[in-house]
Amino acid sequence: MTPDFDFEAAGKRVIDIEANATLALKDKICSDFTKACELILACKGRVIVSGMGKSGHIGKKIAATLASTGTPSFFVHPGEASHGDLGMITGDDVVIGISNSGKTEELTTILPLIKRKGVPLISMTGDNSSPLAQFADAKLDVSVSQEACSLGLAPTSSTTATLVMGDALAVALLEAKGFTSDDFAMSHPGGSLGRRLLLLVETIMHTGNEIPLVSSNASISDALLEMSSKGLGMTGIIDDNGKLAGVYTDGDLRRTLDQGLSIPDTAIADVMSKGCKTTTAHTLAVEALNLMDNNSINALIVVDEHNTPVGALNMHSLLKAGVV
């Protein structure tokens, strides 16, 4: 190792080279990009992504991104394809072939068979005069002026450019299809993302005796005892028919104290907040969070279709469930 080697300078140089390679892709988004998107949108089967070596690794990521954003896709290894896996590809599919040189033997070997099946081919290559590009129905240019590797050998800028082009395809298709966050959630049910997008209020709300509720005839003192025992920072107030009439929160208590009202003698109905925000049990938890944020409140009463309280939750409930 060279004495006093400047690791930071080397790292910054790599980032500069790869950033420039990425920005250069903008000028390569042309009619072939549109054609590639149209071929995929018209596809009745799946998008098959294939590539060798580092291109294969990038291809797996592109296939995964397409699949998770509403475009059914999977990766087929070109070496395995010529030994039986080509049967995975049907006439209803579209193939994306990835090769920086466009001459990868394992990939070019199966190109005539792909075309014989009548399968549309999209190439992602650094050489649009290569065999891969010449076979393609849509040619995506991912060429780079230089690799970030100082030896010019390790695929670096070229793989980054290919990955970015794959992302551009996936997002363009996502937007064209009107793919929504709900659609996205259906393919990401696990982890924090799934909790944020799929969890319903009914799963995390407090129910039964845990719901802070007092009657409209109760005093402020009664309401404070209920708030303290249930620990949600508020209580709902119900009328004689069990319907929600309003809420009383920590903020309401501060306003009560500012007015100098008698805590033991004042009826809660006189100081409660009417027309309060509520949610339902079948609302997404993330929507309840947005409701709280947009209205600067920390808790909600959950009501049914008859405005009868069936649950309650606060910001801590959402935090504990991993929604925040």
Image (cartoon, grey):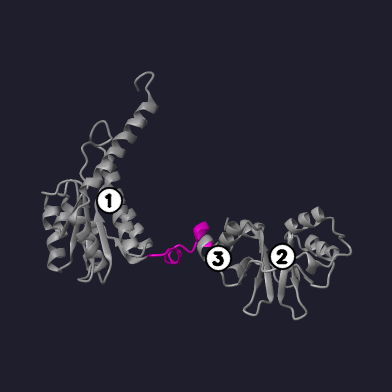
Q: Which residue position holds label 3? A: 199
| The C terminus sits in image quarter | bottom right
Tell me where the magenta segment starts and ends, as one range. Answer: 179-195
Front residue (pair 153, 198): 198
Amino acid type at mark 1? Met
- Numbered disc 3: secondary structure: loop
Q: Is residue 117 visible?
A: yes
Q: Which residue position holds label 1? A: 165
Where is residue 221, by image quadrant? Answer: bottom right
- Numbered disc 1: secondary structure: helix
Nearer to us: label 1 or label 2? 2
Where is residue 199, by image quadrant? Answer: bottom right
Amino acid type at mark 2? Ser
Front residue (pair 73, 41): 41
Which residue is rendered at x = 72% and y = 66% of the image? 247
- Left or right of 175: which side holds 232? right
The Cα–Cα distance between marks 3 and 2, rounded to whole angstroms, is 28 Å
User: Disc 1, disc 3: CB below 8 Å?
Assistant: no
Which sits earlier in the primary sequence, circle 1 or circle 3?
A: 1
Where is residue 263, by image quadrant? Answer: bottom right
Residue 216: give x, y in percent of width and height: 79, 72
Residue 22: give x, y in percent of width and height: 28, 43
